[in-house]
Image (spheres, rainbow, N blue to C red):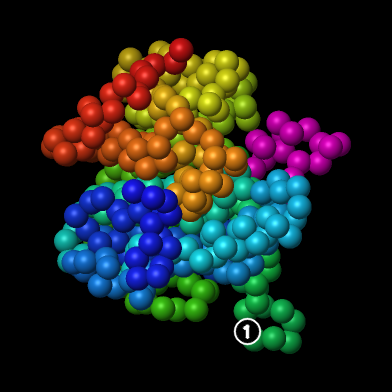
Amino acid sequence: MALPHCYDGKTHLPIPSGKYVVGCTDIMTGGDTENGSFCRIFYPTKLKDPFEHASRWAKYLPHEMYVEGFTAVGGFRIYFLGKKLISWAFGNSYIPVVEDADPSDERNFPVIIFSHGLKACRTTYSIFCSDMASHGFIVAAMEHRDGSACLSYNLEREENNKSLVEKWIAYKPMSFEGDELVFRQQQLQIRSRECSQTLDLLFKLNKGAEIEHILQPTIDFAMFKGIMDLSSPIIAGHSFGSATLLRTLAADKRFKVGLAMDAWLWPLKDEIELAQKITQPVLFINSEAFQTVPNLSTMKLFTVDADHTERRVVTLKGSVHYSQNDVPCLLPWYIRRFTYPSAIDPLVAIELNNRISLLYLRKHLGHPADEELSKLVEKHADLIGEGIP
């Protein structure tokens, strides 16, 4: 099927593959960026058909300012042409999830905290997050406010002004004079703290506790009371987000499973003690084009001497670093060919990534095996490499 998809004049990401129609809502809790949380929650709903509610699908860009954010980090030689491309491809696209829909009446949905990579934001992995939600997970896609997102913001009160205004947080590039390793490790500390704070937020929502939500209220958060299974929280991430999840697994033992997608581990290259502190099972799903010998050597630190738990490493053959986020599915083939070339079909890559993830999670959560999930993986077994080369 041609990409991107279109329904009723709306360009959209692929429809989630699970049995649940997915809803989403954004949450920003009060306090400064060090104490607050900012995330988009994807969750199963009681709705039956996503197309019946296409008028309520979420826009891909949550604010027009994100056009500027993605353009600024896109590396375009001609800025205004890059901005036009982002505005056209991202600004006119939708995520086929229903904003502020009522959640399913069912209970005990396991939870996933998702950490994005450098230059991304809370919507950049919407295919993965919505697909997980359609299979019965509640996913909190974080937007880190450490300067690693393409753009983010905090809401603050100005002097003599009772209303809240956006204080934008631009992507923070590494300065030429600075020590990049120290810089990235400082960001990791902030990101890891944000992951734990977001899990704290889910515990509060599940208890029905009051939260200081400072975005314009659109729903009653009491609807999340009692619907989550918080006995085995999962943490997932891509690239720098994978380094984030490894640091978080070592520091916060409430997280029981890790999903590391195309992990960029240079900031952890000397963290032997950190690797020894991680006792939880971790799945690494690598792209073929991104991984290097030094990066894989660091990955081995987190996979050896783990006899007590499963550490699995798989490689999606023919894939590139962006195969696990939404970008390839937002662009037509003639632009992908020159900007994000890949030997594997973008839909096959993301479907394989998600099915392998689901099978791993079901195993470690003690859920029964799913034959339908296994069929797609078996069909494309030639595209999956096992272990670290």
Q: Residue at x 51, y 51 (%)?
A: 331
Height in image: 307 above or below 133?
A: above
> Dot 1: what SS?
loop
**Residue extending furthest toward the right:** 177
Q: Position of residue 250 (x, y in %)?
A: 47, 32
- Mark 1: give few (<14), some (14-19) or many (20+) Cα within 10 Å: few
Q: Position of residue 284 (x, y in %)?
A: 41, 28
Residue 266: say if magenta: no
- Of residue 15 and residue 231, the one placed in the foreground of this image is 15
The residue segment tinted magenta is 172-187
> Does 10 sit left or right of 263 as displayed?
left
- Asked if one can make out residue 131 in the rendered structure from this viewpoint, the answer is yes
- Kind of residue indicated by mark 1: Ser
Q: Is 196 drawn above or below residue 292 in the view shown?
A: below
Q: Quadrant of residue 188?
A: top right
Quadrant hosting residue 382: top left
Q: Which residue does the image show at 75% across and 55% down from the upper left? A: 79
Viewer-proximal residue among 25 and 124: 124
Residue at the disc numbered 1:
163
